Image (spheres, grey):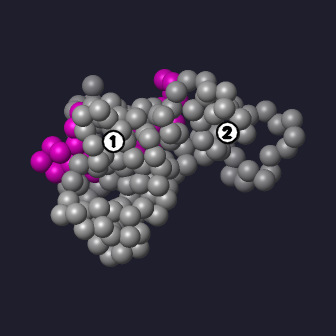
Amino acid sequence: ISGRFRRDGIAVEAGTLAVLNRIHNPNALQIGQQIKVPVDPVVAVVEKRSYAMMVFVGESLLRLYWVGHGEHDRTPVAEFTVVEKQPRPQWTAPDGNVYPYGHPNNILGEYFIKFQHPQFVGFGAHGTPMPETICTMSSMGCIRMLDEDIAELFRILPRGAKVIVRATGS
């Protein structure tokens, strides 16, 4: 269903439809069953001061997550676009070493959502093996999330969605 809407230019994921319609088992859908499909964009807003990420469909709040972000204010205030979603990602450390998924030095967890910006590169959202760093400034700049939260965000945030990072709760 989501693929059909994406072909029509509506940025939506199967997970977005599942959350909006409280569908826990997609195999239980019935022919002719009506479902809600968002025509407004799905947008994530990160408020650095409150360590909150809010996911909206238009003006309606869909989800709220607690996050960590960049140590020494390394997470830029900017508007990003989701360009890639990587399950089981490898991680390239600042020193250039590449760690495959599952390696003890790979800090990304199960999922990485890659952000694009004309000036800022290398940013995204990912899980963490250090849940105690949520609601802290401790990453190298990416948005850190609890593993179950990034798994859900991975399902509901479509490619092409905007991710807006704000300095305050305003």
Classify 5 as above or below 148.
above
Main secondary structure type of the part rendered in magenta: strand
Report how far apart the C-alphas of labels 2 and 1 lie in the structure: 27 Å
**Residue 36 in the image: x percent, y percent?**
69, 31
Left or right of residue 148, residue 73 in this image: left
Residue type at tag 1: Ala
Does 78 appear above or below 102? above
x and y percentages locating residue 92 in the rendered image: 29, 61
Tell me which corner region of the image, top left, top right, bottom left or bottom right, holds residue 166: top left
**Residue 61 in sight from this viewpoint:** no
**Label placed on residue 119:** none
Instruction: Please report the residue visible at 18 percent of the width from the left and 64 percent of the height from the top.
Output: 95
Query: Residue 128: image x %, image y %?
Result: 34, 62
- Sequence-first disc among 2 and 1: 2
Left or right? Give the position of 89 relative to 74: right
Res. 28 visible in picture: yes
Instruction: Report which quarter residue 18 is drawn in.
Output: top right
Q: Which mark is residue 52?
A: 1
> Mark 1 falls on what kind of element?
strand
Residue labelled with disc 2: 2
How packed mark 1 is, by other alpha carbons closer than 10 Å (few <14, some 14-19, many 20 or more), is some
Q: Amino acid at mark 2?
A: Ser
Q: Which residues are magenta?
A: 54-77
Single out the residue that lies furthest toward the bottom: 104
Using the image as rendered, state which of residue 126 and residue 61 is in the foreground.
126
Residue 62, image x, y percentages: 51, 36
